[in-house]
Amino acid sequence: MTRELQRTISPVDGSVCAEIELASRGDLDAMLERAVAAQRSWKNVSIDERAAICRRAVELMVGRADRIATELTWQMGRPLAQSPLEIRRGFQERAAYMIGVAEGALADIALEPKEGFRRFIRREPLGVVLVLAPWNYPYLASVNAVIPALMAGNSVILKVSQQTPLVADRYAEAFSEAGLPGRVFQHVQARHDDIAGMIGDGRVAFVSFTGSVDGGCAVQQAAARQFIATNLELGGKDPAYVRPDAPLEGTIANLVDGTYFNAGQSCCAIERIYVHRDVYDRFVEGFVAETRQYRLGNPFESDTTLGPMVRSSAAAFVRSQIAEAIGRGARGLIDAREFPADREGTPYLAPQLLVDVDHRMKVMTEETFGPVVGLMAVNDDDEAIALMNDSRYGLTASIWTTDVDAAVSIGDRVDTGTWFLNRCDYLDPALPWTGVRDSGRGCSLSRLGYEALTRPKSFHLRTRL
């Protein structure tokens, strides 16, 4: 029987960098059966043993960060100088934290004494957890669910984007070498309709999805066939507000990085900036100067700081948003000719900074997911808050000021999952990662992340008759 092949095209040079056989429906059925059987045994393994295996797997992957980084750059285009950081920093930090808090987060909850009774609440694993991970930060997005799901006693099936399929292979290698019992972790590539069938299968107990709003809606629709929970981490149009007392040099450096890192292909990238009118001109001047320091080109060259977008169609979409904004009166302050690698019809796209923008323009209201940002001058906090809240998204938002009390009070008025002061584009694993409105629902990371991956079971024990 001939298997259907899925080919991954590298944005670096258009070559085929991976070929993966797609699973059939029969394969998926067998995979689910194995996952159910494996989980029955895995849930009885002590948390200490689970932690030892997960730590060892993480250590193995961190030790292979350079090899993983090279693969990742070929698959999705991030500069090679930056790719290892996904493993050595974020991946390692999140995994270590979630392993470290597992025992406390999963411990029985003892209730106040009651004569003649013993009462407690136990956190029970759900069963089979299906993790659907994206291409832009495939290790960071997947580790948020994979490690805590295993630590909680679930089995895991991982499906990574077809753009970065080798990520799942690296997990499988590490878990196997670390001694994870067979079939507790499995991975798959399959057609979308077959994955939807898995989501609706009664053997899947929970789905963790990171991706687009449309993808989240499809997951939710498929999950509606049964009574299971989903964690949906979707899009963003993340704003920043620069107050007049902000230290401009550091603020500009951080916001430029938050805008253009990974070619802006991050759910929590900075996509719109509101700057107090008192410092607007100086901010714009500094932002332009910092942007011009970037080097667009082949991500394997050492001086490249901005690689290609994931595919030509993604770059074309960003170009269309820029063109629409300019057609409505915006001005681009970066001449693409300053970035010779920029070419129409390719994934290579120069960074752009737009001024004279407003909320009639899609670049200020719809997710861009590329290396462009719009800047607007505002008169005061109230105007900034109103503009930040004028969005169907709410993943993260940031404020840049030396007044911490003002930051907290303003943060109380901004509709967002995470509120930053003087930083952006970062996940602290001790804090829940969550969003509002079209940025999704549920949460991952932190001790609260374990609540979604387990169910409470009440023990009501009458000790005397």
Image: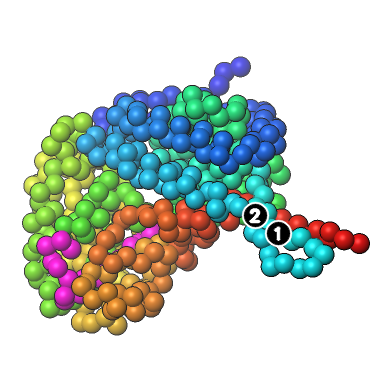
The residue identified by callout 1 is 120
Q: Say if 324 sits above or below 78 in the image.
A: below
Q: In which quadrant is the N terminus drawn?
A: top right
Q: Say if 239 sits above or below 40 in the image.
A: below
Nearer-the-camera pick, 400 or 22:
400
Left or right: where 176 falls relative to 35: left
Query: Could you say whether the residue bearing mark 2 is in a helix, strand or loop?
Result: loop
Q: Is any atom of residue 223 visible in this view?
A: no
The answer to whether residue 180 is magenta is no
Q: The magenta stretch spans which residues?
A: 235-251
Residue 398 in picture, x, y percent from top left: 30, 66
**Which amino acid lies under the numbered mark 2 shown in the image of this protein?**
Asp
Badge 1: few (under 14), some or many (20 or more) residues near its Cα, within 10 Å? some
The residue identified by callout 2 is 108
- Residue positioned 45% across, 32% down in the render: 56
Residue 186 position by quadrant: top right
